[in-house]
Image (tube, grey):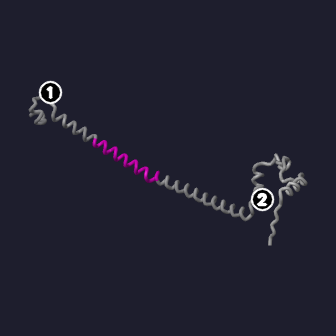
Amino acid sequence: MVKLEEVSNDHIDESLSDNDQYSDYSDDEDDFDVDEDESLLDRIAALKEIIPLKHRQRMSSSVSTVTSWGKTGATFVGKSAWVLTTSMLLLVLPLALEIEKEQALVAYEKEAMQQQGTQQMLNSGMYQPGQPQAQSQKGLTPPGF
């Protein structure tokens, strides 16, 4: 069984005054010797002693796995983009150009039909000078009649 004993503050103060030179708290800057030649990489490398070997190996394998999946994914995306781009250039682009040519031809034919219709309307309703109006409405007569 455990026996608890109360310790008074006077007893703690006496023990501290006897051991002032061995205090837990120190104002000396010598306790934190910093090597000025030490680089950031050296400090990071020193951190590996804090993390146990088992955890370091687990983290290393997970980072390796993620890196492998990332490389595989990037390769797949790159190759897929290449296949899609070349397929579009070889198959879809000529089709789109032909559709555009066909639409331009249809628009040109419509415009020609409209101009021809306008021309016929103008010719049928126009009075030609030097001929009586009745003849212009009958149509053209061959020469010599």
Q: Residues within 10 Å of mark 2 (few under 14, many from 20)?
A: few
Between marks 2 and 1, how big is the CA–CA gap?
A: 113 Å
Q: Quadrant of residue 104?
A: top left
> Is residue 130 rendered magenta in the image?
no
Rendered residue at 82%/46% (across/down)? 36
Quadrant (top left, top right, bottom left, bottom right) of the C terminus: top left
Q: Say which element carries label 2.
A: helix
Rendered residue at 43%/52% (across/down)? 92
Kindly identify which numbered label has been placed on residue 49. Answer: 2
Q: Where residue 39 appears, x then y in whole percent?
A: 78, 48
Looking at the image, tell me whether mark 2 or mark 1 is earlier in sequence order: 2
> Is residue 106 rendered magenta in the image?
yes
Circles 2, 1 touching at the beta carbon (< 8 Å): no
Which marked residue is nearer to the observer: mark 2 or mark 1?
A: 2
Rendered residue at 75%/53% (across/down)? 44
- Circle count: 2
Q: Where residue 79 appears, x then y in whole percent?
A: 55, 56
Of residue 99 and residue 128, the one placed in the foreground of this image is 99
Amino acid tagged 2: Glu
Q: Where residue 129 appears, x then y in whole percent?
A: 14, 27
Which segment is the magenta one? 88-110
Amino acid tagged 1: Pro
Of residue 134 and residue 106, the one placed in the foreground of this image is 106
Question: In the figure, 33 relative to 59: above or below?
Answer: above
Quadrant (top left, top right, bottom left, bottom right) of the N terminus: bottom right
85 with respect to 132 (left or right): right
* Residue position for label 1: 129
45 with respect to 100 (left or right): right
